[in-house]
Amino acid sequence: MNASEGILTARGGMTSHAALVARQMGKVCVAGCGALEIDYTTRSMNVRGKTIAEGDWISIDGSTGEVIEGDLRTIPSDVVRILVTKELTALLNADGGMSRGTMAARDGPARTRAMAWRNKIR
């Protein structure tokens, strides 16, 4: 699992061991793909008559469960980009207004909670 970018299993579900470990490792996982037939002797898998060999590219969408043949170009989500850059360019205030500027990502939730708490006290 360490060497892979994502996990695809023929059996299991969102609470399976593979899914839990993948989540913990920050990897994409589609567990329980019923159409998947794995052939361990030829090191390949068959999906509805299409054979994919070890080393062939597949792309996995962990949100929808879709598995696509080939290497798709992807971009990180907004959440990942914020975590990587550690900056927020806009922070939604608890009162619904927008605060512009740069702020460390770790300060955003605390600031929003503090603002929400102040609004409750009033």
Image (spheres, rainbow, N blue to C red):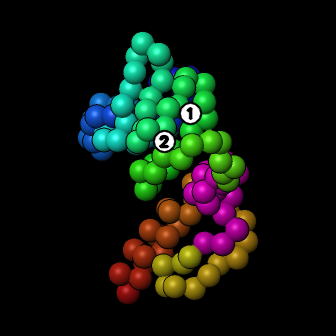
At label 2, which amino acid type do we have? Val
Q: Is residue 101 left or right of residue 9?
A: right
Q: Position of residue 102 (x, y in %)?
A: 72, 65
Q: Residues within 10 Å of mark 1 (few under 14, many from 20)?
A: few
Q: Are marks 1 and 2 in contact (CB under 8 Å)?
A: yes
The residue lying toward the viewer, choosing from 116 and 97, is: 97
The residue lying toward the viewer, choosing from 79 and 97, is: 79
At label 1, which amino acid type do we have? Glu
Residue tagged by mark 1?
A: 5
Q: Is residue 22 left or right of residue 2?
A: left
The residue lying toward the viewer, choosing from 55 and 14, is: 55
User: Disc 2 on helix, strand or loop?
Assistant: strand
Residue tagged by mark 2?
A: 28
Residue at the far top in the pictured view: 41
The boundaries of the magenta stretch are: 76-91
User: Disc 1 on helix, strand or loop?
Assistant: loop
In the rendering, which numbered label is found on residue 69? none
Above or below, 52 against 100 in this view is above
Q: Position of residue 118 (x, y in %)?
A: 43, 78
Q: Residues within 10 Å of mark 2 (few under 14, many from 20)?
A: many
Q: Is residue 25 visible?
A: no
Q: Which residue occupies 66% across, 63% down? A: 88
